[in-house]
Each structure stands twice: as structure tokens, then as C-alpha cells.
Amino acid sequence: MNFAPLPSVDVAAVPSDGFVLDVREDNEWAAGHVEGALHIPMSDFVARFGELTEAADDGRRVHVMCRVGGRSAQVTQYLVQRGVDAVNIDGGMLAWEGAGRPMVTDNGEPAFVL
């Protein structure tokens, strides 16, 4: 069988106004996340798929994020199979934080990757 390589991008290639889907769990999200990202934990993803299609109805590329890239790779594959323009963010939030990209919390505390 031939499988197409999973589309992925480096954190530096994610536009500052890019559409980010964060599939980490609630406690990881609470510690720190990309401002404006859509949060749908992987454990809820299939049931909440409609939320993504509503949010991404403008046709923008979906940049999928988790802690290091494993969960987001699975979600990216799911999305690509359904015809969504989606890419996995290489290295996830750890790479995002390491690159000095901005992160926020909902409570105003300093953001970090859990």
C-alpha cells in the first residue's frame, strides 16, 4: 500500500493569524495555549467534529497542535481523509514554546507547556 506522507509544518511556518486547532486535554490547554486557537481535545474530537467544520468554514488551512505532535498527527490524518486542508505542527506546543511563539492562559497566569 502507498500512503501519502502526513502534511506537516514547522512552527515558524504557522502564520500569526493562522487557524490553530489544539487537541490537547483540558489541563494542558489551561496551562498555556495559542491565542485564538480552537480547543477540541482528541478524546472528544469525533463527537465534536462539527465545531471544527463550523469554525473552519472559511476554507483556511487547519494547523493541528498537541504537546509534541503524536495526537495531532492522528487528528490531521483524520481531517485529511475527510478532505480538510489540515497540517500537523511539527513538535507541537513544546516546539512552539521553544521558538518563543506567544502563548496565553484563560486566567492571565504565565503560560507554559504541561
Image (spheres, helix red, strand yellow):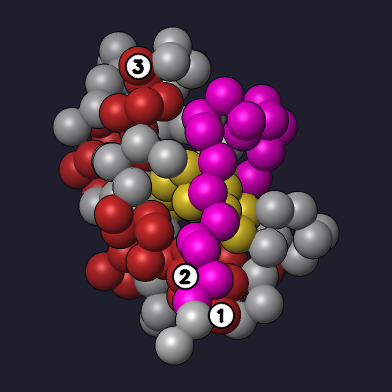
Mark 1–mark 2 contact, CB under 8 Å? yes
Q: Residues within 10 Å of mark 1 (few under 14, many from 20)?
A: few
Q: Residue at x 60, y 81 (%)?
A: 82
Expressed as whole percent of the image width and height from the top left, the position of residue 9 reads 55, 41
Q: State the image coordinates of residue 101 (x, y, percent, origin top left).
A: 48, 17
Residue tagged by mark 2?
77
- Of the pair 2 and 75, the residue shown nearer to us: 2
Badge 3 amino acid: Gly
Q: Is residue 104 visible?
A: no
Circle 2 packing at 10 Å, graded few (<14), some (14-19), many (20+), is some
Whether residue 6 appears in magenta in the rendering, the answer is yes
Q: How many angstroms separate mark 3 from mark 2 (CA)? A: 25 Å
Classify residue 16 as left or right of residue 88: right
Q: Residue at x 81, y 59 (%)?
A: 58
Label 1: which secondary element: helix
* Residue matched to label 1: 81
Residue 7 horizontal/vertical position (percent): 56, 56
Q: CA distance from mark 1 to mark 2?
A: 6 Å
Q: Is residue 110 above or below residue 113?
A: above
The stretch in magenta equals 3-19
Q: Quadrant location of the N terminus?
A: bottom left
Question: Please, what is the three-letter code of the amino acid marked with disc 1?
Answer: Gln
Please check the rendered image and state whether residue 9 is part of the magenta-colored stretch, yes or no.
yes
Give the residue at mark 3: 98
